[in-house]
Each structure stands twice: as C-alpha cells, then as structure tokens.
Amino acid sequence: MRELNRYYQKFNKQSIRRTITDSSSSESYRFDSIIINNFINFLEDLEFKSMAIYSPTRHEIDTVEIFYYLKKRKIEIFYPLVSSNLLEFGLVENLDDLKIGKFGVGEPRGAKKASIDCIDLFLIPCLAIDENNKRLGYGGGFYDRAMKNIDSKKTLAILRPKRLIRDFSAEAHDIKIGKVISVEKQNMEERDELN
C-alpha cells in the first residue's frame, strides 16, 4: 500500500509539473514585473548581508532585476551550481560570471563557494507551492537535499499566478518556503512565516 501511495504522489507531482511546463501562457508572464516589485519592496525592510538567488528557466520569473537591486544594496549574491549531484552556492559579482550548466541555466564558474549556513536568505525556484508552503520543484531533489537543515524563515519564493495549489501530495523531504511573494495579495499576508 505504501508503494502504491508513493506512486500516486509521484504521478500527481509529475502531472502538475507537466501542466505547468506545457502551458507557457503569456498571461502569467505579464505579472512578472509586479511580482518582482512586490519582492523588492518586501526586501527593503529586511537587514541581511547575503542572499542566494537563481538563474531562471523559462517557467520561472527572471531574477535579473533582483540581482541589480541586491548589487545596489551591496549584498553578497550567490547562485546555485550542481557539483557531483550536490547543490553548492558560488559568489557572483557580475552576471557574466554565469555559464550555462548541466540543466541549461546559468551557474557560477570559478566563483568563491560559500557554506550554505553562511547565507542569510535564499530565493528558491518553484514551479508551484501548496497550501502549507511546501515547494514543488522539477523533481531532482537538489534544493530539498541542500536545504533540509536550513530554517524555512530564511527561504523565499516568487510565484506566478495560478501556481498556488491546494495539495500536490507533498512528501516529507519537500522543503517548506518561509515567505511566498505573488500577485495574490492574500498569499503575501496570510502565508508569511518570516514575521
């Protein structure tokens, strides 16, 4: 029975991933700038010295504006890179420091690596979030493994419309996101774990 339950959980997650990645609606992209502005406004009130962000896939919100905002505030910026099937974080001074990696996204090359415990905040890529702020990623488990001992209060996500899903049968290893920023105002107020 346990294996059957795991099969249905996996199927459910896979079907949600497929639905999101197959539907590249320009409708959802039009909210990206609003979401970025909401996110930057949220960061204005926080004191921190370092942050990990990500180089997006076409299914995620572009983080370039966030990078330049953080540079202006003199925040150390780290990007993830996959090394020996593990997720590490490298310091990025300039976007030219990013090279296309194994999964088709920019990764820091030759950068100073940081211990994950030394990074103040993490902007985590997500395809969707459930009602308990559990993250649905791409299925590789890189963030789930890397972030398993990180306090969820240090984790943030930006999410396009219609990516808040009541339930996708999250598993124990799926990480919880502390703060989700979206265009849905209710989500910003009621799902806040940081304050």
Image (cartoon, rainbow, N blue to C red):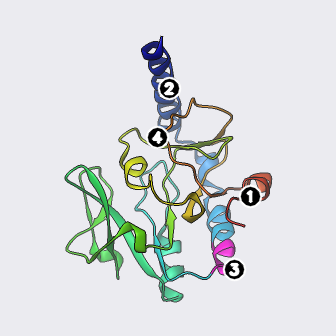
Q: Residues within 10 Å of mark 4 (few under 14, many from 20)?
A: few
Crowding near pointer 3: few (<14 within 10 Å), some, many (20+)?
A: few
Foreground: 23 or 5? Answer: 5
Between tags 4 and 1, which lies in front? 4
Amino acid type of the residue tagged 2 in the rendering: Ser
Q: Earlier in the sequence, mark 2 or mark 4?
A: 2
Disc number for residue 45: 3
At horizontal 50% and vertical 17% (from top left) the residue drawn is 5
Q: Nearer the viewer, residue 161 or 24?
A: 161
Q: Is residue 36 above or below residue 161?
A: below
Query: Which mark, residue 15?
Result: 2
Residue identifier under label 4: 173
Mark drawn on residue 188: 1
Is tag 1's residue or tag 2's residue first in the polypeptide sequence? Answer: 2
The amino acid marked with disc number 4 is: His
Look at the numbered discs 4 and 1 and tell me whether their residues touch, using CB distance below 8 Å: no
- Residue drawn at the location 45% of the way across and 25% of the way down: 10
What's the CA distance linking mark 4 and mark 1? 24 Å
